[in-house]
Each structure stands twice: as C-alpha cells, then as structure tokens.
Amino acid sequence: MPLAVWPVGQRSAQYQRAGRYLPACTAHPGKMLPDLARRIVAEYSRPGQLVVDPMAGTGTTLVEAALAGRRAVGVELEARWAELARDNAEHVLGPDARRLVEVRRGDATKLAELLGPDAGRVDLVCTSPPYACDVGNLDTTNWGAGHNLCATGERNYSADKANLGHARGAAYEQAMAAIYAACLAVLRPGGILAVVTKNTRRKGRTLDLAGLTVALAEAAGFTYLQHVVALHAAIRGDDLVARPSFWQRTQTQKAAARGEAAHLVVHEDLCVFSAGPAQLASTTKEDPRAN
Ligand SMILES: C[S@@+](CC[C@H](N)C(=O)[O-])C[C@H]1O[C@@H](n2cnc3c(N)ncnc32)[C@H](O)[C@@H]1O
C-alpha cells in the first residue's frame, strides 16, 4: 500500500481559515483543514472535473475545489451547516467560482437521487465522516463556572439523533456502508473516493476508524489505493509541534489523570480508493506544492 505523509499543519487551522472562511465556522466541531482539502483536490482531480462531498459540513471541500477550478456539489443533512456552507462559498468565491458550487440539503445515503444527472459522472468524492464526535460548541464561560464545557444538545453536529454523529458501533457501520455504496454509485468508473478519518480514543481504547473505513469501502466495492498520513502537527526542524484544540488538550489531560495511555492526536488518516480498478497515476496533473 503506497504510504505518504502530507504536512498539512504547517500553518495553524485558524491561520488557514482566517480571511477566507466565515467566523461562524467555529461552531462546527469537525471541519477539514483547508490545506488538506486543497491538496486532495489537486492530487486526485483536474480542473473542470466534478468533486462531491456527501457530508459537506461547512463546505471546506467545496470552497477549495471551486478555488481550484473544479465544479463542486455538497450534500449536508443539517440545515444549519448547509446554509453555512453556502454562505462560505458566497463569502470566499468570486462570481465565476461561486457558480461552480451547489449545496443540497439531504441524506448522504440518497446521494444518487440528490445528484440527479450528475450521478455516475463524479470524478472525486472527498469527505470526512461524522465520527462519533462528542465535542460541540465550546462554552468556556460555562466551563469556568464549573459546568459542562459543551452543552449536550450541541454535541455530535446536531441534537437530531438522525445525524450520524450520534451513531455508534453496528449502527454507525451500517450507515457508513450505505454511504460508501452510494458514493460508488455516483462515481464514474475509475473515479476516486478520498476519506479523511481520525482515530479516536474512548476510555483508554483506540477506535481504529481508518481500518474500519478501509473495510467498509472495500466491502462496498472500492479498491484501496493509497494511505496518507495528514500531519496536523507542524514540522519544526527535527521536532513535531502538536496543535491541540482546547477540547483535545483538556480531554487528554483528564484521560492521563485517570491513568489512561492518552496522548495528543497529531494526524488524521486519508484513505484513498478507486471506483473499479486502480488508476491513480493518471489523475495527478498538477503539482500540489504550487498551491
Ligand atoms: C466531519 S463533518 C464534515 C465537515 C466538513 N468536511 C467541513 O470541513 O466542514 C461531517 C458532517 O456530516 C453531516 N452528516 C451527518 N449525517 C449525515 C447524513 N446522513 N447525510 C449527510 N450529512 C450528514 C454532519 O452534520 C457533519 O456536518
């Protein structure tokens, strides 16, 4: 399996977003790093091609794809995030690039229906699944007063239990299997599925979400092409400098205090698949370092 390491955390997440994405994006707990989205788009698609994000959140994939001259369609279950994705595109993109982006509200399992005539013509699906995200909008004032850092209704992307952020175990696997099958159905033969996951830790145990993603995508009929370590820590000389969020730092400290083998997460896993036989070499046209 070809393995690559991409240093996409050389600039902080805040710096990557500053002046491009709306401040309202801070409310979304699981955004993709713009430098990672940009590199995925550059590596696995060409200008003029169609990029889809079936769980688009704040629209990072869509914005970066349109800035790179791709047409981009996003699907998002929550009205709140779908609207924010639209607003981001409106905010960042000029009129020409803005026309390249569409955001549709809906369930990713119904992707073919939602894409209509574009189903079967998608060149790249680039997404990050909602991985049992316990974190929500942080309320540090509340926390300072001895209450919860994050209101319960704010967790898992939404209070709506239909949001996959709430799904765990077999329910999560079943739903994601359906979404990967839906992705396969909309990709053209040889199209690429790029999934960004982060392994999580619960009660001292690691959830190998990357491994699970590979198993589910392969079971859906994808060919596993490449694994990329998307480094969130910055490389400074011979050192890796972690960039933990406030939430991650406090959770890691608490876990360590409980005696769990916890450490800061410094990378995400990008799992890359092909719809049908492998055709990776032919998709790369641009030098991503130029971005
Ligand atoms: C990890 S976030 C994606 C973040 C996005 N990449 C960004 O940069 O903002 C996953 C998203 O999937 C959405 N979601 C959850 N279940 C869904 C479903 N069944 N169909 C579509 N979207 C869903 C969540 O609301 C959440 O916004």
Image (spheres, rainbow, N blue to C red):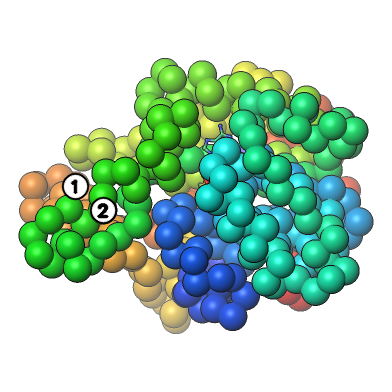
Badge 2 residue CB within 8 Å of ligand 1: no
According to the image, label 2 marks what residue? Answer: 150
Where is residue 265? Give x, y as percent.
36, 55
Residue, x 8% and y 60% (percent of image)? Answer: 146
Is residue 17 shown left or right of residue 273?
A: left
Residue, x 55% and y 62% (percent of image)? Answer: 33
Where is residue 229? Give x, y as percent.
53, 53
According to the image, label 1 marks what residue? Answer: 261
Give the image quarter of residue 201.
top left
Instruction: Report the image quarter containing ligand 1.
Output: top right
Instruction: State whether residue 132 is above or below residue 181.
Output: below
Residue, x 9% and y 47% (percent of image)? Answer: 259
Q: Which quadrant does the N terminus fall into?
A: top right
Give the image quarter of residue 53.
top right
Q: What residue type is disc 1 on?
A: Ala
Secondary structure category for the residue under label 2: loop
